[in-house]
Image: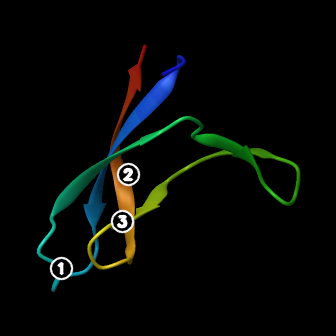
Amino acid sequence: MRAPYFRLTSRCNNDLCPVDTFITERKRIHYTSTSGRLETCTRQVCPECKTWGFIIDTEEIR
């Protein structure tokens, strides 16, 4: 793995989902929006129920 990678801890919003929190690893968390501004990811898709979950913790992996 090349540095930097980010470990994102997210919380699922679906009350019926058996997953409360989940962890994903991504290479990029910053992106350019359609308006041209630099944005940071704030949500991830839950791997179990495929609904949005909000990121609660970001950790850089070297």
Residue farthest to the bottom?
Answer: 16
Say left or right for 38 vs 6: right
3D distance between C-alphas at marks 3 and 1: 11 Å
Give the amino acid at mark 3.
Gly
Residue 5 placed where, x, y %?
48, 27
Q: Quadrant of residue 7?
A: top left
Q: Name the residue under label 3.
A: 53
- Which marked residue is nearer to the observer: mark 3 or mark 1? 1
Contact between labelled residues 2 and 3, with CB atoms less than 8 Å apart:
yes
Compared to 10, does 49 lie above or below?
Answer: below
Mark 2 lies on a secondary structure that is strand
Q: The disc labelled 2 sits on which kind of residue?
A: Ile
The disc, 1 or 2, on the residue closer to the chain's N-terminal end is 1
* Quadrant where the C terminus is found in the figure: top left
> Residue 3, image x and y in percent?
53, 16
Question: Which residue is under mark 1?
Answer: 17
Mark 2: few, some, or many residues within 10 Å (few <14, many ≥20)? some
Q: Residue 55 carries which label?
A: 2
